Amino acid sequence: MISEILIDEVERGFGSDPRLDADTLRALGFTSKGDGHWHFEGMTIWNSSRSVTKSLDLVIALVEWRLPDLEWHSSGQKTPCARYTAVIRSGSELGRNFEGTATSPARALLGAFLRAVRAERHGE
């Protein structure tokens, strides 16, 4: 389950967080079979080499894999609060926007992604 508490932890934290990586991947439906990987519907993530809380490339891959019909963009650091913003949106005029604001581009896009997946699961 993707909770607001999980999203808040993603957006408030700094750098790589292995516990939060695991919590986030579980909430997205990934499972770990003890082989050093996370697996879900045709996607595999290596535990040891990629952190969903730190790797912008990995978050982009997740967005493109899970939400291929949606667009996303990210802005640079906002001063003076030193935060980054990312938005995932539908291409249609009536589409919704899902925003993430965090301490890094990866965490900002991950926050937006988690909100978009949660809304998709609940038919919002």
Image: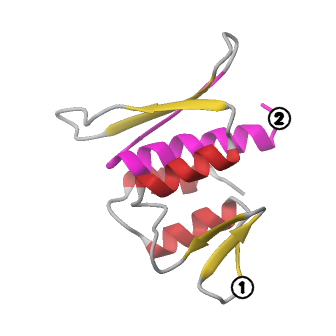
Among all residues in the image, which is located at the extreme left?
Answer: 80
Q: Is residue 16 visible?
A: yes
Which x, y percent locates residue 121? 79, 44
110 displayed left or right of 55: right
**Residue drawn at point x = 45 percent, y = 54 percent:** 57
For label 1, the crowd category at 10 Å Cα-Cα, with few meaning under 14, some 14 to 19 and many 20 or more, is few
- Toward which corner of the image does residue 79 lie, by quadrant? top left
What kind of residue is marked 1? Lys
Read off the residue under disc 2. 123
Q: What residue range appears in magenta?
A: 96-124
Q: Is residue 36 left or right of residue 10?
A: right
Q: Is residue 5 magenta?
A: no
- Ranked by sequence position, the earlier of labels 1 and 2 is 1
Residue 114 visible to the viewer: no
Whole-number angstrom distance, CA of label 1 to CA of label 2 = 30 Å
Viewer-side residue, 25 vs 45: 45
Which numbered circle lies on residue 44? none
User: Looking at the image, is 43 positioned above or below residue 89?
Assistant: below
Question: Which residue is most to the right?
Answer: 123
Q: Position of residue 4 (x, y in %)?
A: 59, 48
Q: Are marks 1 and 2 in contact (CB under 8 Å)?
A: no
Q: Residue at x 59, y 85 (%)?
A: 36
Q: Is residue 97 above or below residue 16?
A: above
Q: Nearer the viewer, residue 7 or 47?
A: 47
**Is 116 inside the magenta-drawn segment?**
yes
Image side of residue 24 versus residue 77, left or right: right
Q: Residue furthest top?
A: 93
Picture coordinates of residue 61, whole percent (x, y):
56, 52
Residue pointed to by mark 1: 33
Which marked residue is nearer to the observer: mark 1 or mark 2?
A: 1
Callout 2: helix, strand or loop?
loop
Label 1: which secondary element: loop
